[in-house]
Amino acid sequence: MKTSTLRRAVVPGVAALALAASLAACGSSNNSADNAGGADGGAGNSASSGSLSGTVAGGGSSAQEKAQESWRAGFGQSNSGVTLTYDSVGSGTGQTNFISGAYKYAGSDSAMDDATLAKAKQTCGGDPIEIPVFISPIDVAFNLKGVTSLNLDADTIAKIFTGKITKWDDPAIAALNDGVKLPSTAITPVHRSDASGTTWNFTDYLNKAAPSEWSSAANTAWPSTKGESAEGTSGVVGAVQAGDGTIAYIDDSGVQGTKLGVAKIKVGDSYVAPSADGAANDLAASEVVSGSPETVMAYNLNRTTTDAKNYPIFMASYEIACQSYSDANTAAIVKAFLTYITSADGQKAAAANAYSAPLPSDVASKEATIIAKIGS
């Protein structure tokens, strides 16, 4: 799989998760959904007035799974008649299925690469929408008998995941953890086997923060065969839980509720634990990629911060949609759902269930302007 500085290519897969939700809005139909075919959607034929009905399919990022559950549940509390589905198949498959037209909206933990963006433009008949909706730290989680606290820096993490450091009592780890009794247990790094935006963000961090130890560019595909692999966030969590000496990069929402240890990461002269606030602070210190279409808010994330208020291993997970759908109901449903996702209520719901950080107000304001462009 080819690499790029920001955007990545993708691979397909299958999974399903559905939750009923609905929308009361102008212009619609009582017809059932027909989700076949490109961006033309299939939430039913449009009409001049009345409530909308039908099904709109989406999917992608498994890191967004808990947030998507909250968003669809919250949306459904005040709406009925529309069924929204979200397949938690991974970011790469989400992008692919959006381009094919199988999904009318998609979640992705990495921005589309230039080639994928061009394909999305063909699918949508114009520039697609790509906006961050879910800000979440990525934990370096471990399962090591007798050890509950661990400090790591970027170089040491890179050496662990490239296989240069193979034992937990290696001098490089010990030097960062004065007073911690480290066993000689073998280290088993675990990585994602599927195309993953979480992998893209983790490898982007290593490439920028530890360039002397990690030469591979950011990629949705893990760049080596070393270590153990598992599919999806839940698969990686299960693999780490199953073995003593394991370590992995996992979205924070997947680690919550487990007994896994979580490393503190060296930022400047301090060691910083992952937090939603730290991730949001780092996004605020990042810049939107120059030259992007006005409906695309893809970020160059700041991975080399020295400010201890920031946590540099995080994802700004995106929602992808079209500006225009030929079916009026599809357009109205996607527009209303994205409006809810990015609202204060939607962000609060995600934070409660997925431990994510609410969008900064200036980012949410810009996104509202972009979402307003959705129509038929």
Image: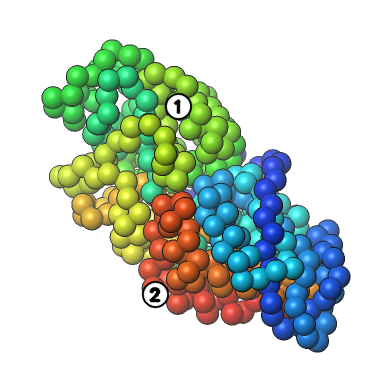
Looking at the image, residue 209 sits to the left or right of residue 349; the answer is: left
Query: How packed is label 2: few (under 14 Cα within 10 Å), some, or many (20 or more)?
Result: few
How far from the left and from the top, in percent, is residue 9?
A: 60, 47
- Residue situated furthest bottom in the rendering: 48
Residue 258: x, y in percent? 41, 35
Using the image as rendered, state which of residue 266 and residue 85 is in the foreground: 85
Colouring style = rainbow
Task: Determine whether, in the image, residue 41 is placed left or right of residue 237.
Answer: right
Q: Which residue is mark 1?
A: 240
Q: Is residue 76 above or below residue 242?
A: below
Quarter of the rendering occupied by the C terminus:
bottom right
Q: Residue furthest front?
A: 77
Residue drawn at x 27%, y 24% is 147
- Residue 39: image x %, image y %? 75, 65
Res 256 quadrant in image: top left
Amino acid type for the residue under numbered disc 2: Asp
Q: Residues within 10 Å of mark 1 (few under 14, many from 20)?
A: many
Pick the residue in front: 345 or 153. 345
Residue depicted at x 66% and y 71%: 79
Residue at x 73%, y 66% (from the top left corner): 82
Disc 2 target residue: 362
Residue at image point 75% right, 74% down: 52
Residue found at the far top of this picture: 184
Q: Is residue 331 visible?
A: yes
Disc nearer the start of the sequence (1/2): 1
| Quarter holding residue 195 | top right
Tell me if residue 86 comes above or below residue 155 in the rendering. below
Camera-side residue: 203 or 290? Answer: 203
